[in-house]
Image (spheres, rainbow, N blue to C red):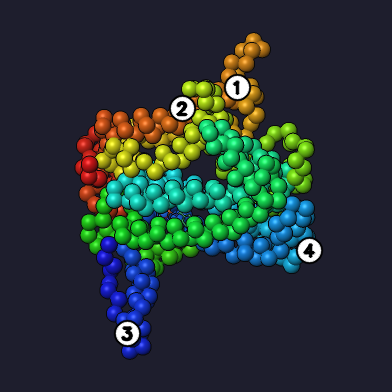
Amino acid sequence: MSAHTKFAPTSKTAQWFESRLPILGVAHEFLTFPTPRNLNYFWTFGGILAVMLVMQIVTGIILAMHYVPDTKLAFESVQAIRRDVNFGWLLQSMHANGATMFFIAVYVHMFRGLYFGSYKQPREVLWILGVIILLLMMATAFMGYVLPYGQMSGWGATVITNFFTAIPVVGADALVWLRGGYTIDQATLNRFFSLHFLMPFMIFGVVFLHIWALHVVGNNNPTGISVKTNKDTVPFHPYMTIKDSVSLVAFAIFFAMFIFYMPDFFGDADNYVEFNSLKTPAHIKPEWYFLPFYAILRAIPFTLFGLPATLYGLIAMFGSIAILAFLPWLDTSKIRSTSYRPAYKLFFGLFVIACLILGYCGSQPTDKAVLQIGGNVVLDMTGLAQIFTAYYFAHFLVVLPLLGLFEKPLKLPASIADSVLIKGGHGMPYGAAAEPQTKG
Ligand code: HEM
């Protein structure tokens, strides 16, 4: 991607410095980075995520100055932060609700990518780096949730780490290795605290690569058409800086609503009770952002080759994330944007519904009845989760590979500029074959 203008420092000092460390050139490249002129507000979530990441790191570092990673003091230290530390209530609320906001933003960012085909050639590496970020985010959030050492922290960690015993041969050792002992205890808290502090910096590193990759291949856009001429783009500054700022302020207002008025909205009542390894809560469930994956983990019913169902559940859960990395090759359509794929649009809608229903299943007890006929339970939560787990995988392994071969896309505008500058440039007659946007 070439910038709109080339950076040439005028002052002697800047020239001297630039010839030794071309940092001003890099900043200039960012400001003049050509962005497609038709980007909508869904393209502002990457910027929101970058700000959220920095905010989580800053609030986390200050919280770590007051938090005590000791099983006897951890719960109390979080209460002390909320009650006694100056602005501790604000920091703790920003950090805990920040995790939720981070996941809201990342799911919007990902579904934007899924809808507009941002994972397709030439953005495969950019996408895979995103999947790695998602995995790191999940691990970080899981370990962070254990730190306040409430009932759900301890029991959530117990249930999830227990699943690893299903791994053949090394399962029992893996469990002890993860926990640092036979139960969730001091060693677990120490390692989770240490890793929870480290991992955001690893995320930061991968985000750096993610944005670097973005600057090599350039942004996708709502039409999915590649940039052809300078007319298709505008410089990042001031166009995107303004748009990103508007979005960031709106997002901050939404976020502030929870920080100030509903700080415990996303918290589980059980987690305001200190962890007691002898008292199991009635219903153990993870935070909302893990629920669809939790439903998949619990959905697998069969034991095969003498291996337990929980092992297949574990494989399905990790598989449901890993499969995203293969998406650029599973989707055979030559058209990027779903806006021009009427048939796929229906399946995309179904996929979103499947994810939401899986999330609901994850939040409910497995044996809760969904459908009863004459007093008999015909479908329970496990059954519902199985149906939508099947669709989740079929979407990637059947729909995406086959649909691209058969569907008839809509006609695309001639260029990005045409799609916004010519009246009706966006409204395409149905039926006319579209030109391929990706090679092979
Ligand atoms: C900490 C988390 C993340 C940060 C800070 C981040 C940051 C960014 C930024 C700044 C952009 C450019 C602006 C935009 O398109 O919104 C971007 C683009 C992109 N990101 Fe992320 N990202 C994150 C996570 C992810 C994840 C989890 C995925 C997917 C699994 C992903 C996939 C993409 C893709 C495909 C693009 C190119 C979009 C396009 O031009 O159409 N990102 N990201």
**Pointer 1 residue:** 380
Q: Report how far apart the C-alphas of labels 1 and 4 lie in the structure.
A: 46 Å
Q: Report how far apart the C-alphas of labels 1 and 2 lie in the structure.
A: 16 Å
In the rendered image, residue 204, in percent from the top left (x then y), is placed at: 48, 60
In the rendered image, residue 288, in percent from the top left (x then y), is placed at: 60, 42
Task: Give the secondary structure at mark 1.
Answer: strand
Discs 3, 2 touching: Cβ within 8 Å: no
The numbered disc on residue 15 is: 3
Outermost residue, bottom direction?
12
Q: Is residue 152 left or right of residue 123?
A: right
Q: Sequence-wise, which precedes: disc 3 or disc 2?
A: 3
Discs 1, 2 touching: Cβ within 8 Å: no
- Mark 1 lies within 8 Å of ligand 1 (Cβ measured): no
Q: Amino acid at mark 3?
A: Gln
Q: Is residue 302 above or below residue 213?
A: above
Q: Amino acid at mark 2?
A: Ala
Q: Sequence-wise, which precedes: disc 1 or disc 4?
A: 4
Q: Amino acid at mark 4?
A: Asp
